[in-house]
Image (cartoon, coloured by chain):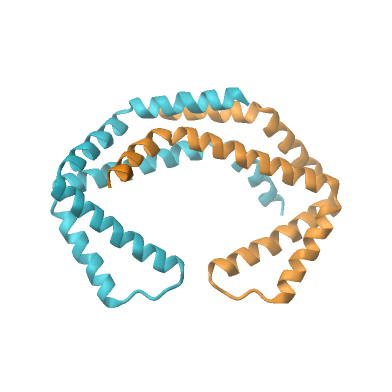
Chain colours: A orange, B cyan
């Protein structure tokens, strides 16, 4: 199956050279070099991650935690670079989603036949 | 971003023409045409799906349900075609996993830099 992985490598290369990836990379680097922005973003992500983990484990999320997350979000919302980064991450995630959808189309079609027959 | 989606289409085409996909497709068709095998597989999958959903919703799984799932699994294990299909599905899933890993490598690298810096 080297051809399939070769194609995947080509795709990764195209992704790496895309405008979307370059923008994302630049914003990343800029934020990493800005200590205040970096800490703000890290805090925000940690709070998000904690809440997600709690939710997945079926643990209750307190009103205080919701308010803390809300506060962190309001903070990062005021930081233009972080907001730009998040927008670019959103765009990249959509792009990767579209790519994945295309790739698994043959499998979707195969399994769709099963469902319509049931 | 037409280039990226073009590449994804090329990849889907290579996947569709791969030996792995052809095998999977043939086994699928054979089982779909075999009423007994099809029903056996559907039953097995429905039981699996129910248990998964229960688990994800944090619901308790009874001893009886575990035994029922075990029985269904023992049944399909005796059906050579179904076992072949499951093996091919496993292989396809690994392949798609490898492809996805390759594609998201640029992003992994970008985020890995963050983590080592922390």
Quadrant location of residue B81?
A: top left
Q: Is residue A75 visible?
A: yes
Residue displayed at 83% across by 58% down: A75
Horizontally, residue B39 falls left or right of residue A51, namely left
Q: Is residue A3 visible?
A: no
Horizontally, residue B34 falls left or right of residue A95, namely left
Above or below, comparing residue A32 to residue B10 in the picture: below
Above or below, comparing residue A4 to residue B53 in the picture: above
Residue displayed at 21% across by 42% down: B32
Quadrant into which the N terminus of chain B falls: top right
Horizontally, residue B50 falls left or right of residue A47, namely left
Front residue of B113/B64: it is B64
Position in image of residue B89 (x %, y %) = 31, 43
So how many labels did they put on this image?
0
Position in image of residue B63 (x %, y %) = 28, 77
Quadrant into which the C terminus of chain B falls: bottom right
Front residue of A26/B77: it is B77
Residue displayed at 31% across by 39% down: A113
Horizontally, residue B23 falls left or right of residue B16, namely left
Position in image of residue A39 (x %, y %) = 80, 57
Above or below, comparing residue A79 to residue A94 in the picture: below
Quadrant location of residue B19?
A: top left
Front residue of B20/B107: it is B20
Position in image of residue B76 (x %, y %) = 18, 55
């Amino acid at each position: 199956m080297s051809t399939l992985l070769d194609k995947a490598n080509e795709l990764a290369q195209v992704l790496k050279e895309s405008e979307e990836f370059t923008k994302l990379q630049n914003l990343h680097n800029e934020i990493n070099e800005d200590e205040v922005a970096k800490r703000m973003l890290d805090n925000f992500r940690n709070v998000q991650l904690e809440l997600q983990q709690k939710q997945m484990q079926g643990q209750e999320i307190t009103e205080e935690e919701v308010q803390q997350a809300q506060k962190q979000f309001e903070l990062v919302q005021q930081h233009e670079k972080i907001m730009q980064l998040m927008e670019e991450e959103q765009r990249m995630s959509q792009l990767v989603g579209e790519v994945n959808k295309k790739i698994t189309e043959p499998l979707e079609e195969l399994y769709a036949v099963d469902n319509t027959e049931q």
